[in-house]
Amino acid sequence: MEIMNIVEKRKFIHRHLHRVNEKTINELYEKLRSEEVFKAKLESRAQKSENDIQAGRVFSREEIEQRIANHFY
């Protein structure tokens, strides 16, 4: 089997997509959808973190270490 780059793989999938059975389409759909949901969650967390930083809601390294120590011991 030859090694294909990402562009070649996309072209191959696009050319053959009409022949794929429903199960495979559903699996691909769920995979792509879950990646989009994950990406949206990461972006939301990043935005919340940026908002916290801008609002000054941050902890020093010492505060974090103390919280960790208190939590586990």
Image (tube, rainbow, N blue to C red):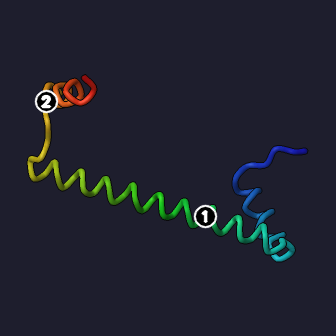
Q: What amino acid is labelled 1 in the image?
A: Leu
Count neighbours of disc 2 (C-alpha within 10 A) and say few if under 14, some if 14 to 19, many if 20 or more. few
> Residue 6, position in %: x, y?
70, 53
Count neighbours of disc 1 (C-alpha within 10 A) and say few if under 14, some if 14 to 19, many if 20 or more. few
Residue at figure coordinates x 82%, y 44% from the top left: 3
> Residue 13, position in %: x, y?
78, 64
Label 1 residue SS:
helix
Which is more toward the observer, 10 or 50?
Answer: 50
The mark nearer the N terminus, 2 or 1, is 1
Question: In which quadrant is the N terminus drawn?
Answer: top right
Name the mark on residue 32: 1
* Position of residue 35 in the picture relative to residue 64 (left or right): right
Which is more toward the observer, 71 or 18?
Answer: 71
Q: Which residue carries the number 2 mark?
A: 63
Residue at figure coordinates x 24%, y 28% from the top left: 68
Q: What amino acid is labelled 2 in the image?
A: Glu
